Structures are given as C-alpha cells and as structure tokens.
Image: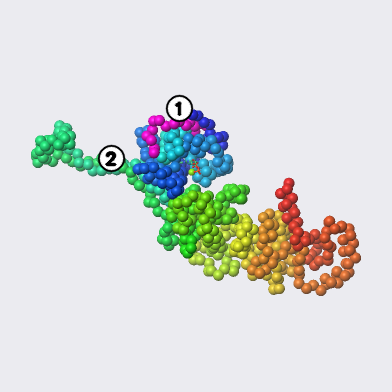
Amino acid sequence: RNNAEKFEFQAEVSRLMDIIVNSLYSNKDIFLRELISNASDALDKIRFLSLTDKEVLGEGDATKLDMQIKLDKEKKILSLRDRGIGMTKEDLIKNLGTIAKSGTSAFVEKVQSSGDLNLIGQFGVGFYSVYLVADYVEVVSKHNDDKQYVWESKADGAFAISEDTWNEPLGRGTEIRLHLRDEAQEYLEESKLKELVKRYSEFINFPIYIWASKEVDVEVPADEDDSGDEEETADKTSEEGEDEDAEKGEDEDTEKKPKTKTVKETTYEWEVLNDVKAIWLRSPKDVTEEEYIKFYHSLAKGFGDEKPMAWSHFTAEGDVEFKAVLYVPPKAPHNLYDSYYKSKSNLKLYVRRVFISDEFDELLPKFLSFLKGIVDSDTLPLNVSREMLQAHGSLKTIKKKLIRKALDMIRKIAEEDPDESGGKDEKEVEKSSDNDEKKGQYTKFWNEFGKSIKLGIIEDASNRNRLAKLLRFESTKSDGKLTSLDKYISRMKPGQKEILYITGTSKEQLEKSPFLERLKKKNYEVIFFTDPVDEYLMQYLMDYEGKQFQNVSKEGLKFGKDKTNKELKESFKELTKWWKGVLTTNKADDVKISNRLDNTPCVVVTSKFGWSANMERIMQAQTL
Ligand code: ADP
Ligand code: MG
C-alpha cells in the first residue's frame, strides 16, 4: 500500500514471534481464547469510560457492546470484530510490536524449555498467538480519538501501519483478520468455531455472535418445466408493480396445478454463542465445583489442568455490600517475590456488574496479592472516576473483610488436610471421600505461598495472630515434616514458658549447633528457622497465645532452677574475669558461666536485642 509506514518489531517480540511461527505446539486453539480476552478487555474499557461520559459510545450500532465472528471460506479469513475502545495509531505501534512487555523474555525462556504455549496470556503477549494459525494478520482499528488504521504483518520481523481508506468504517472498535495457514483451515468450520467460542467464552460478560449459516425451508417453483419457472419470476416482479392482471394469472395457474415445492436453502444470520451470566451473582449452592474451576481458569488466563487449591464465594452485607469469589492458585506466579513491592493485586473489581479495574491496590494487601478473584460491590458509586473510587471509604471495609475471608479460606486448607490433623482444630476433617485430594494440600500451599504468610506477619499487625496460626516450620521434633505453633505448644514440657527457636542457613547446619546440645538432652523442642526472611519475621512476632519467643542463640535462655550454677560461678570467677580482660569491650559484652551447653566448652551468645549471628550473615550478604 502506498501510504504504509514500516516498523520493526522490538527484538524480544520478534524472537517470540519466530518461536510461535515455528512451534510444533499442538493446541493451536488457544489463539481464539486470547483474541476473545483482548476484545473483552477493550469492551470493558469503553464501558468504563461510558460511566462518566455517555458520549463515548456514539449512536446506533456503536452502542452495542459485543463481538462478532465471521468466516470467509473463499478468502480463508477468520475475523473477530469488537466494539471496544479501539486503538489509535500510536496504540497500534506500541501495543502490537514496538514495546516489549515485562513478561516477554520470561515467556520466551519458558517456551524454549517446555514448548508449552498455553500460558501465553499470563505473560501479557497473548496477541501474538494468532501466528499459530495465521501467516498474515490484519488489525483494523478505530479509536474515538483518531482515524481508522490498519496494522498488518506476516511475522517477518516487520509490520506496517496505514490509514484505512479502503475498508468499511468500523465506527469504533477493532477487527482482527486472520489469513489462515493451509494447515489451519479447520478454523473456517462453523461447528469448530462454535465449539471453541463456547469453551473459551463461558465467563465473558459480552455477547459473542457468529455469522452463522442456517438451512431454511423455502418454497420454490416446482421445476417440471423450466419455462414455468421463468413465468413465476416474471409474475412476482409484476406483483411488486401492482399489476392486477398478472396476479389474476397466477391465481389461475395455482388452480390448475401445484407449482411450488420445498427445498433447503442456506441463509446467514447472527447467532449468539454465549449466555452472559455472572457466576458470583448466583447462590454458592447452585454453582458446581466444575464451574468454579472453569471460572478460575478464565480469571487466571490459563487453561491448564491444574485446579485452584481453594476458593471462597461469599456475600458481605451491612454498611458495605459486595459479593466476592477468591481463589488460591495452584502455583505461585513466576515472579511473585522478585518484584514483591511492585506486584499488583490480582482481583478484578466490578461495581454492579460493570468491570472497573484489575489494578486496584486498595483491595488487598501486598502479602495477599497472590490471590485471584473478583469483587462486585453494590455500595461503591458507579459514575465517578477511578481516582475517586480509589479514595472511597468503603474500600477499607471491603479490604478488611476480604483479608478475613482469605485467611479463613487458607486456614480451611490446613483443617481439611488429613496430613495436618492432630493439630488443635475445632472442626472435624471433612468427608472422607475428599481426603485423597486434600491430603498434603497445606504443605503444597506452604511451599508455594509460605513466604507471603511470613511477610503478612511482618506487615499486618492486626492479623498477626491469625497469620501466625498459619505458620509452618520444621523443628527438632517434627521428624522432617512441617509443624505449627499450636502443635508446638501442645508438646511443650510442663513448666516450659517460652517457644524456643534457632535461626540459620539450613536444618542440617542447625542440627549440629552447640546451642542445641543441652536443650535436646533435656527434651526441649526447638524450631528451625532457615529462611532469611525468618530473622525479620521474629522481630515482629513477639509472642503467640501468651507465650514469648526465645532465640536459643541469644542471651536470656533459662533452664529453670539449677543449683550447681552458683557454685560453678564461684569457682570459675577468676577465669571469667581473665577472659573479660582478654576480650576487650568491643569484642564481647560479658563472659558468663552457662548451663546451656553439654559437650562444647564455650559458645558465643548474642545479646537479647542484638542481631543474631545469622542476621549478621544476612546483612553482610545484602551489603556485598
Ligand atoms: P494483554 O492482553 O495481556 O495486554 P496481548 O498481547 O493480548 O496482551 O495484547 C496486547 C495489547 O494490545 C493489549 O494490552 C491492548 O492494549 C492491545 N489490544 C489487543 N487487542 C485489542 C483489541 N481487540 N482492542 C483494543 N486493544 C487491543
Ligand atoms: Mg491479551
């Protein structure tokens, strides 16, 4: 085209496209899920804008927020059109090629190692999956702020953008045209498309139409003789001209012999493929497990076989009303703790069924940002800007309730896990038939998200005790398994007042620690904390159920009354004095006779409020 401007794809994007084009990945269907998801996002955006400015929707057909699919068998084109927000020329350049998303290289790496393209949507590059089935793609788009443009590319490292002077005007929105590869012609079959749309659009909140063929019965002239046919046609034409003579003629004809017969004819019409329903508005008892799992997959932008670990569907009533569905995903996302403080909430916020945003940080604290789900509020105002919503007082109440519900949901994973029983839980382990599935679930949860619980203890003072209940660790008595504070307390020795722990780099290293010699001999249980975050954690977690924590490598460890202590102190007085002199004040605060050791002659103990040796090590590693 003579008005086309050429652009090169950003290098990582180009690499990704090469991989997609040459991929042997068999589940090519996923491209449609990605296109529908993008169209739905675009529709959400224009609907959101229309809340504060009705004008943006325009008039007539443009006000209908829907998607339309057409199949052109002759030209081998599959097209999906939406009446969403559309893209300006600049949007097309940036979004479809020149700006690499943060997930691009992470996804390239993942695909190269696993060959699995299914999770493409989660990495923010779902659009490029169209090249699984197409060798040439056109994106026609019209945004309210710009003219209509066409983006096109054959995935050869470059794309072109032209002002659209030849297609039908879209009004507003985007039409994606896939020129299907020879081996992808199955996507021109209506039945195939209907099946796929149904699978991928179950929870899409906008109607999806397909230009569907329909066999209809039509009356046509009987073709006993060809000349009769022509006569009939002639009659009809004259009818329109209100020729009374001709009408009479027809009547006479019909009386003589039946001149028509019924044949099948193909006509086309828009057929709607999804029924737009919101799962969270239904009563939890009417929603099946399968529906919850499917809904999770639609939120998670990935349709793996993995089930979410748990979910909670509830209605909050009172001052602030909302409905919510929360999920614990089966796995932590690839970068959960790399960019923890930058991570965004994964909840979708709706106000009276209208999607508002999925970047509302006011809904959940950082430590719960791994949860997925939706919140639909009846209390929040609809016709205000995002900024005003963000400042709305109800959000605090919603957040508080969501945290409670989330922690309940996590607690239940533990309660229902047969491996966990023996703890101090009021509730019975649920129906035995589920036991197999629930067995080991909490360990799985802990391995994926345990760090979030620890970060929660550090960050959220008001829920510290609830979170501490969810804490798991190994100890000198846990036998290689995870144990909890409640179980620890249930095993405490009579007269033991404190919860004992030690910090270090690994359980193996800690088991050899001289600090444990005497404690082990006396049958005290000591918790192993081996994650660097544990040092910080223990600065915030001072007590649990009225019991203080004591780091056994620190000053202050007591063994009850020990009569020999006084005598020993006396007889070693001179030696300790001498040592104090040798270790001048900046090397040691004090030298003491202690009963915490068994075989080892002496040990360096940290003062009560000082850094433990392990903390020193962590801080040093950080400054390096
Ligand atoms: P993601 O949807 O995760 O952002 P994609 O690769 O699927 O990643 O899409 C890239 C971007 O292209 C989108 O963020 C959006 O800005 C734009 N886009 C894609 N399809 C459409 C569409 N149908 N209407 C408007 N914008 C779109
Ligand atoms: Mg997308």
Dividing the picture into quadrants, the one containing residue 235 is top left
Q: Residue at x 50, y 50 (%)?
A: 386
- Is 164 included in the stretch rendered in magenta? yes
What is the crowding at mark 1: few (fewer than 14 residues within 10 Å), some, or many (at least 20)? Answer: few
Name the residue type under label 2: Thr
**Number of callouts in the render?**
2
Q: Which residue is mark 1?
A: 3
| Side of 597 relative to 185 (left or right) | right
Would residue 69 appear left or right of 325 to someone viewing this image? left
- The answer to whether 574 is drawn above or below residue 298 in the figure is below
In space, the residues marked 1 and 2 are separated at their CA atoms by 40 Å
Mark sitting earlier along the chain (1/2): 1
Q: Secondary structure at mark 2?
A: strand
User: Residue 266, labelled with which disc?
Assistant: 2
Magenta residues span 154-171
Amino acid identity at mark 1? Asn
Q: Residues within 10 Å of mark 2 (few under 14, many from 20)?
A: few
Q: Is residue 42 above or below residue 279?
A: above
- Residue 402 on image: x %, y %: 53, 59
Residue occupying image coordinates x 52% and y 63%: 435
- Of the pair 108 and 282, the residue shown nearer to us: 282
Q: Nearer the viewer, mark 1 or mark 2?
A: 1
Question: Does the magenta-highlighted stretch encompass residue 508?
Answer: no
Which residue corresponds to the image point at 55% horizontal and 37% vertical from the top-left? Answer: 99
